Amino acid sequence: MTTNGQPEAKQDRSRANRELLVDAFLELLREKHYSDISIAEVARRAGLTTGAVYARFGDKSGVAVAAHDRFAEESVRTMTAWAGQSRWETATPAAIIDSWTRGAINFARTYQPMLVLMFADPAVGQRYESLIAEPPELLSRLLSRVMPEREGFHDDVVWAGRAALVVIDRFGPDSADLAERIHTMLHKLIGVS
């Protein structure tokens, strides 16, 4: 470290440029498919050079992984905050399932471009698996607080939650009566009347 703080200023600029590049990539991802985005476009959108992209990420896949990692951190924070609300301590299983279902559909609708990216880039797809495991685990934890546990309960809820996420992905978050169908499916698979 120097007395004039130059190394810290350089690190701050580097972090800021990294964030600018990820922001630019995410903007482009909302506009076009992943395969149609070039490194030059990401750099241009961020107001930086292609060398800045290569220096920080190596290639387009590196930018995609960084975008996913930011997305995953924000998503887990949001999900954890939702699950940590005191209202769930006295909620009915049906209310928990209903809120979880609406949240999962809204999440898919809001983050559709990011979800598409997860399937377009193998490096991102591998990371997606750990992110997608979180919502069913949260659902299981919430339901286990308000329902008497039975043998295999946790595994049943996690399986049902993952099945619901696959249905949302397969049919799209804007499918007619999707929330009602998933709500019914979860009730039956988990055993909630």
Image: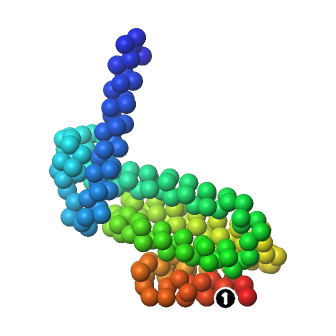
Residue 46 visible within the image: yes
Of residues 87 and 104, the one drawn nearer to the viewer in this rendering: 87
Q: Residues within 10 Å of mark 1 (few under 14, many from 20)?
A: few
- Place residue 180 in its image quadrant: bottom right
Percent across and percent down for residue 38 are 20, 56
Percent across and percent down for residue 3 are 40, 11
Q: Secondary structure at mark 1?
A: helix
- In the image, taking residue 96 as reference, residue 115 lies left or right, namely left
Q: Is residue 164 above or below residue 1?
A: below
Residue at horizontal 29 percent and vertical 54 percent from the top = 25
- In the image, taking residue 107 as reference, residue 152 lies left or right, namely right
Residue at horizontal 35 percent and vertical 66 percent from the top = 113
Circle 1 sits on which residue? 188
Residue 157 visible within the image: no
Query: How many marks on residues?
Result: 1
Residue at horizontal 30 percent and vertical 39 percent from the top = 17
Of residues 126 and 169, the one drawn nearer to the viewer in this rendering: 169
- In the image, taking residue 115 as reference, residue 163 lies left or right, namely right
Percent across and percent down for residue 84 are 67, 58
- In the image, taking residue 30 as reference, residue 50 lies left or right, namely left
